[in-house]
Image (cartoon, rainbow, N blue to C red):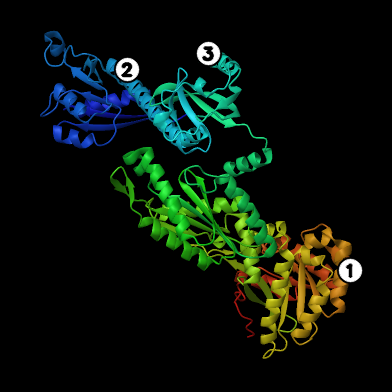
Amino acid sequence: MRTESILNLLVIDADQLYAERLVSLLSAYYDKVNLGFLDDKEELLKSLRQQWDVLVFGRAYDMSFTDVVGIVQEQSLDLPIIGLMSDEMASTGRNEDGLPAVIDGIMVKALLAEKESQVVIAICLQHANVRSLRQLNTLRHVLSEAEQRANILIKNSKSAVAYIDQGIHIFANDPYLKLFNFESMDEIIGLPVIDFMAGGDNVKGFKEFLRQFDKGSRAQVEFNFQSKRLDGSTFEAKLQLAAATLDGDPVTQVIIQQNNNNSAEIAKRLAAAERQDSLTNLNNRRGFEEHFESLYQQAVQDKTGAGLLYIQLDNIGKISSSLGLQGVDATIQQVARTLEQTVAEGHISRFSDTAFTILVEQSSAQVLTDLAERIRQNISAMLIEVDKRTTSTTVSIGIVKIESSAAEPQVLLERALDAINRIRIETKNHGDAYHLYDPSEHANSDDNALAEYLINAITQNRFELFFQPIYDINQDRSDFFEVYLRLPLADADNTVLTPDKFMSVAKAHNLREKIDRWILINACKQLSEARKTHPEARLLIQLTSASLIDKKLPNVASQLIKAVGGASEALTLQFNEQDVANHLTVAKSQFTALSEVGCQVGIHNFGTSAKSIEIIEFVQPDMTKLARNYVEDINKADNIEAIKSLIKRTTELQVDVLMPYIEEAATMSVSWSVGARYLQGYYLEMPSKTITVV
């Protein structure tokens, strides 16, 4: 993908129209030109606080071209300057004509103001030059920091590492000194490597090995030899060479390993080293991931709660710019020590350069947030000393609960990062806060979070039920209620999901049967209360195909009917016509079994199949609920006749018909005449959270 080209152009001139013309011409070369325009010294000093790519000088109220160059020099800026000359200046040589191309590192160019095309080309060239210079400086800075970090790692390495120049020791770390029984580095500086080799053959072979390496050959970088210590004792060793730099000068890196036949012990130490961060001695990311997987499996199998804390340092960029790599490393080491002192029981890891993780077993949300607050306070109270300078830092902490219903470890880690981003937004990148990831807040956009929230909704009764009355024309009463399921989310918008928004996720995670069972039990609880004052009250409950094929459903329905008084017709279970069509034989058997225990059966979304009549002939339901498309445009003559025909054929099979979605008076007036027994819709009555018989 192409990066957008942007030019930040500062123009000092009395003629703003001239500056605007330059911007117009430069638009052919850049996607965006940010123009800064001024004509006096005070404004220039303010403007130089931000970064500019090219400065063009024409005329100023209280400055000359030389003044501008001097100001830029004082600020130590990489800012090329183009001076504009009039024809008179060019012919007389007055003012800045004849200036050198570079003045104390600042690129300078003098051009005729009238030759705008040349000025534009000069701006583009100077911008390209300064951009290359800045990239070079950045690379040099990165290389310098990489060399510093490498040298620090070598000093702290457990491997025996030294630097040599032309075969002479110029540096050695502590393991290297201990390997050869030296007390300090001063004792080894200036000694040749060959002094540590026993036998003439070793010396001769090493000289040839080093000679080939210095010539650039990398065919062989390892050398096996018998080494001798300061006290004269010897051991079998392996030497490895690598090109390196020390204080910017090229050197040769030497790593010496003592050969040991105890390969199992070596393998064990290597495995431990692979999982340890050399700067903090905490586990690194690999160690964290292994422990995370183990804890996740334990939480899922033992159904015990656990937690993950992701701790991100907030201001490490400022520490790096002010104190350099040494300041960053000192900060990270002190944060690591503070975490070890704060966390009594937990697995602490250095996850990345500027982030730590903590895994805590058997922890509730309250325990995790309390721990996060202690960590936040303790780290913000730290004073970090670096070369007689003091700095401080804060952290942002993302918290994720690990429960038996939790998503995969990688998803949980991504949620921790989402929590960090939430902190960034809410604190405007200030940080110094913690946030507990709540799946319910993301259930509307994250299927994994929605699945977890569905499980919590089942176990913690977070679903809501609504009951909409159905008018019975034959009995002239409205004590029949259809049950609707809703799932409120704990998000900022107070979103409420209908089943069509979450049933596909419930199906993918095998939750539909559990949701159906929750609806049955909780709806019948309310029905039982309602029938104490209105014994004729009854319910129509829609279930999924998971219940249609569930052999335990008739037994459950029988128990619920007994619980609400044992009356026939108290409970009607309805299923989607397409689900019935997909399981015809099973549906017929299920409908029969339900009828035998006193439970009525219905089919909703009726009339969408070309074989709707054949379906009800085969499975023999008690009632059907028409599909929405039959009610839409019901006032058209063709639609009315189609509805009347379908209802007539249905009632001839002794199956009652429910006419739903009656939203307005015109629809209501027609609905009386089509032959349906039941009428339902917002025009008649809205759903409510209670069963209210009028």
Of the image marks 3 and 2, the number of the one nearer the N terminus: 2
In front here: 515 or 439?
439
For label 3, the SS is helix
- Quadrant of the frame with the C terminus: bottom right
Going by the image, does 160 lie left or right of 593? left
SS state under label 1:
helix
Dot in front, 3 or 1: 3
Q: Which mark is residue 121?
A: 2
Could you say which is closer to the camera, residue 613 or residue 109? 109
Distance from Cα at disc 2 to Cα at disc 1? 85 Å
- Horizontal side, residue 75 vs residue 404: left or right: left
Given the image, on which type of amino acid does mark 2 rest? Ile
Q: Residues within 10 Å of mark 2 (few under 14, many from 20)?
A: some
Q: Which residue is mark 3?
A: 211
Q: As shown in the figure, which amino acid type bears the numbered disc 1?
A: Ser
Q: CA distance from mark 3 to mark 1?
A: 89 Å
Name the spot of residue 535 as percent of width and height, x first: 72, 89
Q: Position of residue 484 (x, y in %)?
A: 65, 71
Q: Residue at x 62, y 70 (%)?
A: 463
Q: Is residue 4 visible?
A: no
Q: Which residue is mark 1?
A: 589
Report the residue at 10% width, 29% height from top. 62
In this rendering, would 622 be left or right of 98? Answer: right
Foreground pick, 391 / 508: 391
- Give the class, few, some or many, for how many residues have Cα within 10 Å of label 1's Cα (few <14, many ≥20): some
Residue 292 seen in the figure: yes
In the image, what residue type sits under mark 3?
Answer: Arg
Q: Nearer the viewer, mark 3 or mark 2?
A: 3
